[in-house]
Amino acid sequence: MIILVLPLLHRFGSPSLNYKSPLDFGKVSNFGLSQPDEISFNVVSEEITNYDNPVIYNNLSSPITLTYTNKNIKSNYQVSKSGAVLVYDGSLLKSANVDLTKLNCGISFRLTIVTTDDEKYQTSVFFNIPYKSENSSLLDGYLLSTISMENKCIFYQL
């Protein structure tokens, strides 16, 4: 079993970090989910096609895919144009005068691996979720970030 314990380091709005099926990676979904305290990944030994629940291959070759959303960053804002279509391209943030720099966020979590012999290994992971990158920003409607933790984690036995 692999367990992620998920505190968020920045609390502007209502941020949440949730499991996302790798088949849905890059797709916008799950706006209504609240921040869980932890996500437990079931370890499987054979290739599967159903990723509705958090799973990871026993050789750790499958990615851990998560989705970050932040709701309630502006309240009581009214769109001035009647019949205006809401588009998820950041124009609503801009027209509501939301300071995008406040949307920078850091995430830290403990990653615990429990072996079949019930041995526990743990490491801490930290990364930033910026409001912009070299190629895009939240004003584009999304920000896709891939973080490779290869050779960056040191696990300690508990």
Image (cartoon, rainbow, N blue to C red):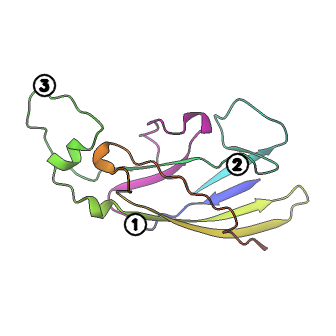
Name, please, the residue furthest toward the top. Answer: 83
Q: Are marks 1 and 3 in contact (CB under 8 Å)?
A: no
Q: Residue at x 61, y 39 (%)?
A: 22
Residue 41, disc: 2
Question: Which residue corresponds to mark 1?
Answer: 10
Q: Position of residue 40 (x, y in %)?
A: 68, 51
Name, please, the residue furthest toward the right. Answer: 117
What's under tag 1, amino acid-wise?
His
* First to last magenta residue range: 10-36
Q: Are marks 1 and 2 in contact (CB under 8 Å)?
A: no
**Reading the chain from its start, which is encountered first: label 1 or label 3?**
1
Secondary element under disc 2, as helix, strand or loop, is: strand
**Reading the chain from its start, which is encountered first: label 3 or label 2?**
2
Residue 70, disc: none
Q: For the stretch drawn in magenta, what is the main secondary structure? A: loop
Q: Residue at x 30, y 37 (%)?
A: 88
Eyeballing the image, is 34 above or below 86? below
Residue 83, disc: 3
Q: Position of residue 24 (x, y in %)?
A: 55, 34
Q: Residue at x 28, y 40 (%)?
A: 89
Q: Residues within 10 Å of mark 2 (few under 14, many from 20)?
A: some
Eyeballing the image, is 149 above or below 146? below
What's under tag 2, amino acid-wise?
Phe
In the figure, is residue 27 to the left or right of 48? left
**Reading the chain from its start, which is encountered first: label 1 or label 2?**
1
